[in-house]
Amino acid sequence: MKRVLGCMAVLWAGVAAAQNQSPAKDLTVGVGKSFVLDSPAAVRRVSVGNPDVLDAVGVSEREVLISGKSAGVTTMILWQDGGTRQLFDVTVSQPNTRLETVKQELARELPGQDVSFTVDKDAVFLHGTVKDLTSAGRAVAIASALGKTVNLLHVDVPPGEQQILLKVRFANVDRSIGTQWGFNLFSTGATNTIGSAGTEQFNPPNLNVQGSGSSTQAAVTLSDALNLFLYRPDLNLGATIRALQTHNLLEILAEPNLLALNGKEASFLAGGEFPYPTVQGASAGGLVAITIQFREFGIKLHFTPTVTPRGTIHLKVAPEVSSLDFANGLVYQGFSIPALDTRRMQTEIELESGQSFAIAGLLDNQVSETLSKVPGLGDIPILGKLFQSRLTNRSKTELLVIVTPELVRPIPAGKPTPMVEIPTDFMKDGPQTAPRTPGPDVTGPVTVRPLPATLPVEELMEQQKQSLEPAASPQPPADAGAKGGDVH
């Protein structure tokens, strides 16, 4: 009976002790590191299971200084007022300097971004969200110092690409001056002679002799009223003088406007294509195969804009002005193949939005002179000028290309769009608008998947890769050419 009562007393004592002791809590401290543990009640006594691992010192009634001494695991017990006890499982770890260095570098290089990692043997798993692909690449480069990195980062959905409008002005001014001088002398019976003398380059008068013998007469017909005409009836002697000066002015102006995304190429063509034969080589029977290809001509422009980190626009521009030149062409099997008179330039410039730059100015001066004279008579001093004719042409061509890039945005929905002004009504009785698919007011609203705030790194990289791939341009048929405008 006494033994039973003794066992029951021990049991009740254990139950009371369990009621006064809280569950064990986990603490972690590094070797050589310390921290202060605050107690809700006054601490009467502290006990450490392994003093070689951990040191605990009471600095006040409610504060205990915990210091890690060596790597290991131990238990710490605090006795508080009221008979309660607190139990702690304390882990003292040896700090990994490489892990700490990587954490510090991530925090320094990617401030304000949520990036964390876990290490399992030689693999490093990156987690969190970064603002762009550059930050993601930098995080991978830093974490790779710990081993093979598995990139599980997400990237904020980037904003829309910037759009650049390129205004180009082609100014081609052609000036030419021509001078003509010539002299033709004719007789309608002076000294019983009928005839004319001169180089006859500038449409001389036409003499028609009528009658015979002493009754012979000459009729004069003028085909060019611009000649100066002199005639002496008493001498039956006349002359025509050609003295003209001409001025010609030709101005060709084109102002193509091109719109392109940042880093994407755009092209423009206002002209056409002309066919030319190409030899493909001899066949097995020795016959030569000829195919027809096409070559573009006109006003062409290729440009690639890139917005720099400075906010400027870097341009790769290749303007070209070409025209068909039949004078320097060739004839192949009865077909005339023209040459191309081309002025082309290619350059790279950097401008701010709205600034202009003249990237090319070309001056072409040409002078040609034609001299015709009567042999012998044209070499006589002073009087020989009456038996000469002279034609002089002077031409001056100026080409100027001015480029102006601008950062633009699309026209907002619902705002009026620019239209070509039509001076008169066209087809009043017909429809005034082109047919189109009914809008949302008829078909109902379009179901659009909500745009996610972030994307996995590999998904965003795949989308950018697809956007950078050049689209396959359709090839024109081999037997047809086209003229007009073409914009890509």
Image (cartoon, rainbow, N blue to C red):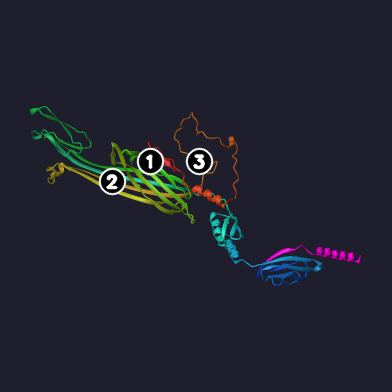
User: Residue 27 colored magenta?
Assistant: yes
Percent position (x, y) of residue 124? Answer: 59, 59
Q: In the image, what residue type sits under mark 3?
A: Thr
**Category of crowding for the residue at label 1, using alpha-carbon neighbours closer than 10 angstroms: few (below 14), some (14–19), many (at least 20):** some
For marks 1 and 3, the one nearer the N-term is 1
Quadrant assignment for the C terminus: top left
- Distance, label 1 to label 2, CA atoms, is 24 Å
Percent position (x, y) of residue 162? Answer: 50, 49
Q: Is residue 68 left or right of residue 484?
A: right
Disc number placed over residue 395 in the picture, else none:
2
Q: Secondary structure at mark 2?
A: strand
User: Residue 239 colored magenta?
Assistant: no
Disc number placed over residue 417 in the picture, else none:
3
Quick check: marks 1 and 3 in contact, CB under 8 Å? Answer: no
- Mark 1 or 3: in front is 1
Q: In the image, what residue type sits under mark 2?
A: Ser
Q: Secondary structure at mark 3?
A: loop
Asked whether residue 40 appears in the rendered view, the answer is: no
Magenta span? 1-28
Residue beneath label 1, please? 271
**Category of crowding for the residue at label 3, using alpha-carbon neighbours closer than 10 angstroms: few (below 14), some (14–19), many (at least 20):** few
Quick check: marks 3 and 2 in contact, CB under 8 Å? Answer: no
Percent position (x, y) of residue 258? Answer: 44, 45
Give 93 or 351, whichever is nearer the viewer: 93
Decide whether the magenta segment is chiefly helix, strand or loop.
helix
Give 386 or 122, whichever is nearer the viewer: 122
Asked whether residue 486 appears in the rendered view, the answer is: yes
